[in-house]
Amino acid sequence: MILFLQQLINGLSLGAIYALIALGYTMVYGTLQLINFAHGEVYMMGAFAALYLAKWLGVDQNPSVPGVIVVAVGAMAFCAVLGMTIERVAYRPLRKMSRLNMLITAIGVSLLLQNIGLLAFGALQSFPSLLPEAKWELTAGLVLRSQDVQIFTTTVALMLALHHIVERTQIGRAMRAVSHSRDTAALMGIPVDRVVSFTFAIGSVLAGAAALLIALDKHKIEPTMGSAYGLKAFVAAVLGGIGSIPGAVAGGLLLGLAETMVSGYIASTWRDAIAFILLIGILLYKPSGLFGKHTVEKV
């Protein structure tokens, strides 16, 4: 029982990270019907932005809560600008072309950013402890880490903020209108380009937050980190129903739980494989995902 509860805590912590990244995939798909495979590299860039900002501000030498907040805001702002730049330069000129052109471009942008990261940052780098770390033994053998608390609280706060933006604000209503029909939204006077750019910014902000959280937890970052986390977050988005915000959250949490349970009860070598087993299963038996809606496309 103790092992199960420990794996549950670990799984929810990992799943929260997947959920934050998966939200970027699902929001972009909802507005452009595009799988933004460069999203994982935006996440990676956010981690390095946080590292160099922490060094520049001296937060790595004098850790403090206000310092970490400044680093977090800076990294998320950097990711937002990067996301909007990718949309403006790489995707917007191809918006009226076939989806295949945009998909190939997304893969190209992903490879470009990854190689820029390799050239600029080198290989594996350590990430400093910017906050005090602690462990609390809830009961015999059951441990809760301060990093888990940070991930839970930050994820919940960001998701509540996202829910407020999407459901309660004018730009949120515009996002939902564009998601339903870009052409109709444009006819109604909604600035589609601005809404799409804002959607990329919001998704990238969440990826930047996830990057800082995982860096504070693992204390190591590398230019290829976006590939693994980005791909698994994409699986989480598909699992929950690509285009569905609640689905992205549920898919991320389910994938995180599945990974930790398989690792704890079967074998750690199956940890990465379970994501693709779930992907194959959901595509075979419920292609629309757990929260997605079945749609018929006329051709």
Image: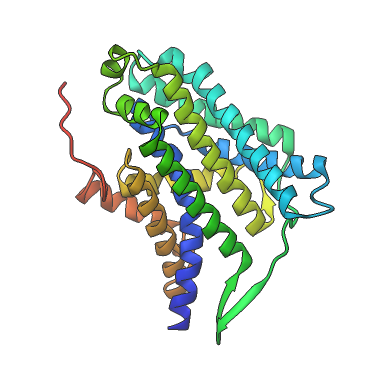
The image quadrant that residue 222 belongs to is top right
Q: Is residue 10 visible?
A: yes
Q: Residue at x 55, y 38 (%)?
A: 205
Measuring from the top left, give residue 93's x and y in whole percent: 45, 12
Q: Is residue 167 above or below residue 20?
A: above
Measuring from the top left, give residue 70's x and y in whole percent: 70, 43
The image quadrant that residue 226 belongs to is top right
The quadrant of the image that shows the N terminus is bottom left
Q: Is residue 283 above or below residue 188?
A: below
* Residue 49 or residue 163, whichever sits in front: 163
Its colouring scheme is: rainbow
Residue reaching furthest to the bottom: 140
Q: Residue at x 84, y 52 (%)?
A: 61
| Side (left or right) of 219 relative to 237 | right
Measuring from the top left, give residue 147's x and y in whole percent: 61, 62
Measuring from the top left, give residue 81's x and y in whole percent: 59, 27
The quadrant of the image that shows the C terminus is top left
Q: Is residue 158 above or below residue 81?
A: below
Q: Is residue 231 visible?
A: no
| Side (left or right) of 116 relative to 262 | right
Q: Is residue 193 above or below residue 126?
A: above
Q: Residue at x 43, y 37 (%)?
A: 165
Q: How many marks?
A: 0
* Residue 207 or residue 263, whichever sits in front: 207
